[in-house]
Image (cartoon, grey):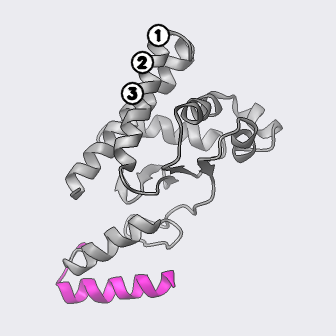
Amino acid sequence: MDGAQRRNLANDWLKDFCLALKNVSLYSEQHARGREYLDRAFESLRRLIGERREVVLVRAEGRLHLDSVILDIDRGLSRQLEEDMSARGVDSIVFHATLTPDEHQGLIRCLLAKPDRIAEKGGFSQILLDEGISSVKANTEKPSRGRDAVDGSLLGETGLVEFLSQLGRGHGAGHGSAGQAAATGATAVTGIL
């Protein structure tokens, strides 16, 4: 999958996920409209994960990143989800490939919980556990230090492979020659190790 396809899938997922949050909050999980959007968001996430082990959603510097993709096609949706995550003390969410529809629905319930209730229950990670959700982890990743910063904790197995393949094509630094990209990438990789 190329970068443009990945960006489109990631931003499609954002739209579907936000619509699921909105419709479940307006109706319910059992209402036909709520179910429709829950199913749509789950299928969108499955397409995004594909053959990978996980994808990581990170909130950093007022923006959302899904693995290495900035979610910015619909800035309003991105900003709203970023604010919702911030209010609930969530810096990152790791979606594992083993995620089930029931766990996905539980995640939506958790994200709709009032921030003070989440704090009372011991934080977002704790309410995920209380819901029996084992395929989603929260706040296990560190926020990015900036758009071009490479943080080893943000690069899952597939993110690292993608980064190294871009580095080999001379896109690692985003500017300059392939040699400059390789030098920048080597410094970044050394920082990861």
> Range of the magenta residues?
172-193
* CA distance separating discs 1 and 2: 6 Å
Instruction: Give whichever of 16, 158 is nearer the camera.
Output: 158
Other residues around mark 2 within 10 Å, as few (<14) / some (14–19) / many (≥20): some
Instruction: Give whichever of 106, 59 is nearer the camera.
Output: 106
Q: Position of residue 141 (x, y in %)?
A: 58, 61
Q: Position of residue 77 (x, y in %)?
A: 40, 34
Left or right for 77, reference 176: right
Q: Residue at x 82, y 37 (%)?
A: 120
Residue that mark 2 sits on: 36
Q: Which mark is residue 32?
A: 1
Left or right for 166, reference 188: left
Indicate whether residue 73 is drawn in magenta.
no
Q: Main secondary structure of the magenta part?
A: helix
Q: Residue at x 27, y 78 (%)?
A: 167
Residue that mark 3 sits on: 40
Instruction: Give whichever of 94, 87 is nearer the camera.
Output: 94
Q: Residue at x 41, y 52 (%)?
A: 66
The reply to whether discs 2 and 3 touch (Cβ–Cβ < 8 Å) is yes
Can residue 146 be seen by looking at this rendering?
A: yes
Other residues around mark 3 within 10 Å, as few (<14) / some (14–19) / many (≥20): some
